[in-house]
Amino acid sequence: MMEVFVARQPIFNENEETIAYELLYRNNQENFFPDIDGDRATADVIINSFLNIGIDQLSGGKPCFINFTETLLKLKVPTYFRPREIVVEILETVQPSPEIINICRELRKLGYKIALDDFVFDKENPYCKELMKLADYIKVDMLAVTEEKREEIELIARLLDIKLLAEKVETRRDFEEAKKRGYTLFQGFFFSKPVILSTYDVPVYFHSYYEVLQSLEMSEPNMERIAELIEQDLSLSYKLLKLINSPAYRPKHKVNSIRQAIILLGLIEIQRWIYVLAIRDMTGSARQISDEIIKLCLTRAKMCELISTKLSEEAVPSSFFLTGMFSLIEDIIGQPIGKVLKDMPLQDDICNALRGKQNNLKKVLDLVTAIEQADWEKAGSAELDINMTQNEYNHFYIQACQWAEGLLKAEYLQAENLKAEVDQL
């Protein structure tokens, strides 16, 4: 079976909340994967990969926009999914015709939603308007489509009550401008990074305190488990590293893992520190990071760690994990990376990677970010001494996504338990 690597890109609403994903693939994959037919590539992605893995595990229960070629529409491949799972995205290469109109009409009757990708209204094609009447969404490339064409599409969308989705939203200005023009959904690399926050702090997101405190209170605390719980929380990891870099605890040697930091600080001090954070969080003074940003940090961390296991024996997985975890820290707290790293006693190779200097940590991080953006050409040019098959890359990415999703789901239960614990203090 042909293995096809797949990435996902979040789709946001006006409140910058993730409401769906687009499953990304490429049918031109020189330098990384063999060049294969577009129909075959897409079919492998959505049938062999996603139906076997389970689309809910990848999407967290949110609908996925999936591109369909004309051939796959005619084969009724969209009906392999439940209507709540997907949005049928019709590629711009599909020419509106009586057959396509009938297929879309049938899909609508079955409860599927339809999106037109990079749609351009063709006055010469009499079936173009009919296709638009069946669409729930029209996706408009904000960089490629001219102002005149955009205005035409926007007018028709308003008349037909079709939701507009802005693609290639690169800046906040693009986002605000698209909102003014009536777009309600947004997609682009602007959303791969969070809006810069004014406070010099990492807002608390994961309510991991409850389980950490339970582990600390055991007669024989499990150091590995405590390190694992703190590693999974960007905010706790950042605050722990910042704390041990204070004059009272500053270590003689820099660290490359959370476990080292825990040993240096001591379990009793960590317990007192987490109680303070827990109480502060429950009073509502902590700011929140969006689900998607924290999910991106976690996915990058796990993916970097997994890839590191395929490097030389000298590679330290925890260093790769921390590099991925803190790869967005500059944007999250709104401070230059140099200033951020002064408060974190990380080893020089991790700091250098986060500053953008080339080393194996940075190369793996670049590979992971290329994969998440479905930039296969860039991913294929990664200068790493690594021997991985297509299937392993695919498995690692899915594993990282599922790991991050699982942590997010566990957070809600932990939050309820934490509130009950703090109420008893």
Image (cartoon, rainbow, N blue to C red):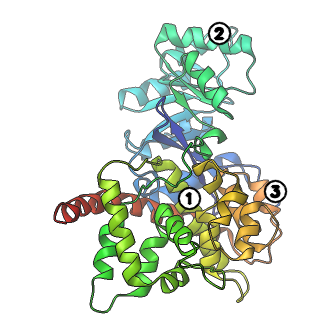
Amino acid type at image mark 1: Cys
Which residue is identified by label 2?
152
- Graded by Cα atoms within 10 Å as few (under 14), some (14 to 19) or many (20 or more), the crowding at tag 3 reads few
Earlier-in-chain disc, 3 versus 1: 3
Q: Give the spatial CA distance, label 3 vs label 2.
A: 37 Å
* Of residues 117 and 38, the one drawn nearer to the viewer in this rendering: 117
Q: Which mark is residue 32?
A: none
Residue drawn at (27%, 86%), measured in percent from left and top?
Answer: 218
Q: Give the spatial CA distance, label 2 vs label 1.
A: 39 Å
Position in image of residue 66 (x %, y %): 54, 42
Earlier-in-chain disc, 2 versus 1: 2
Report whether 146 appears left or right of 190. right
Which is more foreground, mark 2 or mark 1?
A: 1
Q: Is residue 159 above or below residue 255?
A: above
Q: Give the spatial CA distance, label 3 vs label 1.
A: 28 Å
- Graded by Cα atoms within 10 Å as few (under 14), some (14 to 19) or many (20 or more), the crowding at tag 1 reads many
* Of residues 66 and 333, the one drawn nearer to the viewer in this rendering: 333
* Of residues 275 and 187, the one drawn nearer to the viewer in this rendering: 275
In which quadrant of the rendered image does the N terminus lie? bottom right
Secondary-structure class at tag 2: helix
Which residue is identified by label 1?
297
Which is more foreground, mark 3 or mark 2?
A: 2
- Graded by Cα atoms within 10 Å as few (under 14), some (14 to 19) or many (20 or more), the crowding at tag 2 reads few
Where residue 369 sits, quadrant-wise, is bottom right
Which residue is identified by label 3?
30
Amino acid type at image mark 3: Glu
Amino acid type at image mark 2: Glu
Secondary-structure class at tag 1: helix
Residue drawn at (21%, 65%), measured in percent from left and top?
Answer: 421
Q: Is residue 210 above or below residue 409?
A: below
Q: Is residue 26 above or below residue 209?
A: above
